[in-house]
Amino acid sequence: MLVELVKCFGRLRLWEQFLAVIVPFFYLPYLSARKKPAYSDPLIYPREKKGPAREWLDAVVFAVVAATIIRTFLVEAYTIPTSSMEKSLLVGDFLFVSKISYGPKIPNTPIAFPFVHHTLPWSQTAKSYVEWLSLPYYRFAGLDKVSRYDAVVFNYPAGDTLSDRFQSNVSYYSLIREYGRSRVWSDTRNFGNIISRPVDKRENYIKRCVGLPGDTIQVINANLHINGKPSVVPGTLQFKYMVKTDGTGINQRIIDKLNITEGKRSNNPDEYYFWVSQDVADELKQLSNVKEVTKVIEDAGVWSPEVFPNSENFPWNVDNFGPLPIPKAGQVIQLNLTNLPIYERIIHAYEGNELMVKENKIYINGTETNTYTIKMDYYWMMGDNRHNSADSRIWGFVPNDHIVGKAVFVWLSLDPNKSLFGGKIRFNKSMRLVK
């Protein structure tokens, strides 16, 4: 359609049609701004004879453009790389993510190498996009809004800055807390170069949305509470359990039968650690050589520095966390030096304000203040594998402009630990809706 449109303005060259398809939001206004733009009937021009090379080129360009439009605005294929959503979603699941569920976003970086995310396939560090052309955030209307317990794909909020040595495997902010900013930035041998990424090129994560704008979330002894009530998550939750035996081992066939994919033996020969659901833990208790099965829970009041908001003012850990209100657009929050760690990334990193503390006073964009009006909605995401998930308990709120889409359908599930003819294809987990 875009090609036919520019033909009506006499733009018949391949590069002109290419610009109309790739950057229509720039090229079409450019045509309209030229002096005396006039309609030109494309039928009056002689039909161009195309050789085999040009036919192939046209076919390839059409396929690339069509696929890019589909994956940008309609649906995109993803794979599950980690176990953070087990047993709801498994490592090796191939799924479709709907962009139209919450509304597709205009790419921040419209000029990029097709079919890759942020890095060129033949390089570990070369960017797959250009930054000299960037677009502001805009989301088209979607079919629905993010609902509680949706499996949501989003851009990793803490991925705005990272070490190209560690990429997103180790958070830049955790490196800063452990080694100090000066060393991380100067020691390129150990940390590589420090780079930044626009929102749409940050790593894609998938978690379950458990907290909506305006909710208050709290974790009590590993159990999630929303607005003061225990939550009932539709997926199968997993936790870490310590399994103590009489000294004899647990047969591998039993482990396979119970579909246990994560576990290890402790330094004590009679102790195991397994990441399993409550149902599997109950089955382990029935084994004749098992003496004790205990959920591993961190005590309340024991502060974990890696847990959001990374402040001693909030002595929280992954099992005992909050209560914490989730900000919503238009909300006016009271600011002080105690609660500032909760909101500083919202104010500075997500909503683009200059934030400074000077002489125990808070300044936003150069003005002293003790209030701030939230501009965007925020969400709280957690993995179903609660004791093996880097989620909002670690890096905090997920801004609305980071939301990518809704996981809707698993079309193939492959077991990475099995051979092709040894049960690699998990037929019972393929061709299913995501719950």
Image (cartoon, helix red, strand yellow):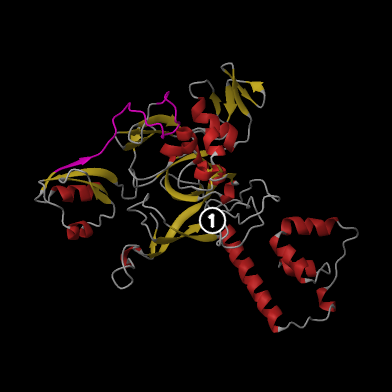
Q: Is residue 315 above or below residue 427?
A: above
Considering every residue shown, the one lying at the far top of the view is: 359
User: Going by the image, does 52 lie left or right of 128?
Assistant: right
Q: Secondary structure at mark 1?
A: loop
Most foreground residue, 40 or 205: 205
Residue 116 percent location from the top left of the image: 56, 60
> Image point 85% across, 78% down: which residue?
44
- Image-quadrant location for residue 62: bottom right
Expressed as whole percent of the image width and height from the top left, the position of residue 30 reads 81, 57
The residue that appears at 42% across and 48% down in the rendered structure is 207
Residue 393 lies left or right of residue 15; in this view the side is: left
* Residue 247 can be seen, yes or no: yes
Identify the residue at horizontal 52%, vertical 45% (top origin): 189
Q: Which residues are magenta?
A: 292-314
Q: Position of residue 344 (x, y in %)?
A: 54, 30
Q: Image height check: is 270 above or below 365?
A: below
Residue where numbered disc 1 is placed:
124
Counting from the top left corner in percent of width and height, residue 370 is at: 58, 20
- Quick check: is 309 in the magenta stretch? yes
Our reading of the magenta stretch's main secondary structure is loop
Residue type at mark 1 is: Gln
Would you say 419 lies left or right of 333 here? Answer: left
On screen, residue 339 above or below 237: above
Q: Quadrant of the C terminus?
A: bottom left
- Choose between 399 and 255: the one closer to the eye: 255
Task: Decide whether residue 29 is among the magenta residues.
Answer: no
Q: Residue at x 34, y 50 (%)?
A: 235
